Amino acid sequence: MTLQPENHVLVVFPHPDDEAFSSAGTIRLYRNMGVPVTYACLTLGEMGRNLGNPPFATRESLPEIRRKELIAACEAMGIEDLRMMGLRDKTVEFEDDEKMVKLVTDLINELNPSLIITFYPGYAVHPDHEATARAVVEAVRRMEKSARPRIYAAAFANNTVDELGQPTIVHDVKAVRKDKEAALIAHKSQTAWMMEETIHRVEEGKPMSDSWFNIESYYLYTFND
């Protein structure tokens, strides 16, 4: 699917590297088109289970390391407007619902995006992912229908295709694969093991499927009202 011009793209995810895995190629393509992209990253992922491979971080140093990794990943994707929203990792699910909706609403009112990229509620696996998705959807639902931005929602749950069908938005990002790889590598405290495993399997003649490097898929979230 060819990307359509957008006025502004707002990306909302809870953790550094959520954007790299799901959307780095799509973001880079939009930036190559000259479309403004704002990334609202809700936390610094300071409770991430990985401390590097081999470990180079401690629980105390990880927040600053992940902050720097996030900045580097945004540089790889061409994002010039990064918002670090300051919520605590693994507690987004416990934030007040209205506070979360207001956070998203304020961003929408400021930026007037024509497209929002986030997770799909109910199919995002992690509690922080789910809370983020719910807030985005509710903020958009409360808008006048004619003013609503479209929502591209990433979904990863095992039952996604069975219940939602095949993704409705499929982007070929092969042309910017190197940029996506650079964004993933930037988050090295969390991704080094995966990138190394991929390299080793290729060297052994047993490459993993690399379709997720080349294709990014979403569901166009639709409202029933």
Image (spheres, rainbow, N blue to C red):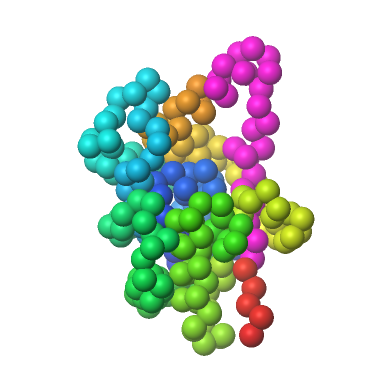
Q: In the rendered view, tell whether residue 197 sits above or below residue 136.
A: above
Give the number of marks.
Answer: 0
Q: In the rendered view, tell whether residue 96 sits above or below residue 201.
A: below
Please say whether residue 212 is one of the residues in the magenta stretch. yes
The residue most toward the front is 94
Q: Quadrant of residue 106?
A: bottom left
Q: In the rendered view, tell whether residue 190 sits above or below residue 29.
A: above
Does residue 180 show up?
yes
Q: Position of residue 168 (x, y in %)?
A: 70, 60
Please say whether residue 58 is one of the residues in the magenta stretch. no
User: Residue at image x 66%, y 22%?
Assistant: 207
Q: Quadrant of the N terminus?
A: bottom right
**Which sits in the foreground, 132 or 113?**
132
Q: Position of residue 159 (x, y in %)?
A: 71, 53
User: Residue at image x 56%, y 52%?
Assistant: 125
Q: Position of residue 221 (x, y in %)?
A: 62, 68
Q: In the rendered view, tell whether residue 139 sits above or below residue 91.
A: below
Q: Quadrant of residue 97?
A: bottom left
User: Residue at image x 64%, y 33%?
Assistant: 210
Q: Quadrant of the C terminus?
A: bottom right
The residue most toward the top is 204
The magenta stretch is 197-220
**Which sits in the foreground, 33 or 91?**
91
Q: Is residue 64 left or right of residue 49?
A: left
**Which sits in the foreground, 179 or 156?**
156
User: Residue at image x 62%, y 18%?
Assistant: 202
**Which sits in the foreground, 129 or 83?**
129
